Image (cartoon, rainbow, N blue to C red):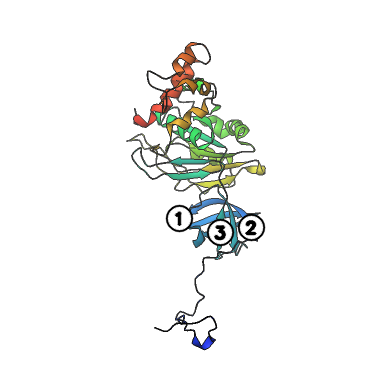
Amino acid sequence: MRRYGKHTDEDDIRSRPNRKGNRPRTNIRPKHEDAAEGMVLTVDRGRLTCLVEDRVVMAMKARELGRKAAVVGDRVALVGDLSGQKDTLARIVRIAERTSALRRTADDDDPFERVVVANADQLAIVTALADPEPRPRLIDRCLVAAFDGGLEPLLVLTKSDLAPPDELLELYGALDIPYVVTSREELENGTAVARVREQLDGRVTAFVGHSGVGKTTLVNALVPQDQRRSTGHVNAVTGRGRHTTTSALALPLPGGAGWVVDTPGVRSFGLNHVDPSRVIHAFPDLEPGTEGCPRACSHDEPDCALDAWVEEGHADPARLYSLRRLLATRERKEGD
């Protein structure tokens, strides 16, 4: 076996030829200090549409990001061709830390969570008061996902010309959630759109709801310059709506006063990813009462300190009932 000393000649060193003729691999990654900042508008089969300044740029995820995925709403850094011209492609090299994340799983037994929208300030839960009938358990699940992900909830109740909103509003009154009630006539004459806009200005709002509730119709009214989505109709046999939105899409409100994120209609909202202990953070009036709770308290058991806290008059009993109803959503089916 040939051994080399400290003072070897170049001719003594054997090197393996690079048959492919490309550069050898290295663990040193470029820093991309000149990368441009952008926002992901939509994702479609590995291609991400991003807004860079005032240009819409098509991009793909860089290999160095590994399995880390960018979703709608993500703030990203891009390099490459940023002209936005046809048949050009940029690369996403960094994904900024998220301020919030709306997550869901396919069902409560699914261990794989999916981030639907990143960096949204608000979650608008759109529910029809009739045709199709409201599903309170689905609303509860969306509320839990909003509280867990750092989004403020907003109830948008549609089709009030078909049924009154009083019963549903009473169910969520203790949660003190802002709401907007709309009718078909108000959507047509624009008065409903104006009321909804008051809740959206200056914010990034994700819209969620099961199919047929009028979610996409409302989004199209809010952003009239973008009619990419076609509205659907309720299935007369099943009472369920047909899916008309197939991927999440971020749309700027007129005048640059905020963003609307239209998401696909959902038939279920799994919460396998949610840690129930984080839901209590959405109830600041109840949270101090948990200091006397036993370790790993579910807040729905005989030794829970919240019962005494409420009995002493520190909080409204209806708030405790609402908390426990939300915490029980993982044990209930959405149609119950």
Q: Nearer the viewer, residue 13 or 256?
A: 13
Q: Nearer the viewer, residue 107 or 64?
A: 64
Q: Where is mark 2, residue-wise?
A: 36
Q: Nearer the viewer, residue 55 or 114?
A: 114
Q: Image point 55% across, 45% down: which residue?
A: 98
Residue 67's x, y, as percent? 45, 55
Which label sits on residue 43? none
Q: CA distance from mark 1 to mark 2?
A: 22 Å
Kind of residue at badge 1: Arg
96 relative to 301, above or below? below
Residue 157's x, y, as percent? 50, 29
For the question of whether residue 163 can be seen, the reply is: no
Kind of residue at badge 3: Val
Q: Image point 51% across, 29% down: which residue?
A: 281
Residue 204's x, y, as percent? 59, 40
324 relative to 5, above or below? above
> Which tag is nearer the camera, tag 3 or tag 2?
3
Classed neighbour count for the residue bearing mark 2: other residues with Cα under 10 Å, few (<14), some (14–19), many (≥20):
some
Kind of residue at badge 2: Ala
- Sooner in the amino-acid sequence: mark 1 or mark 2: 2
Q: Quadrant of residue 110?
A: top left
Q: CA distance from mark 1 to mark 3?
A: 12 Å
Q: Where is mark 1, residue-wise?
A: 67
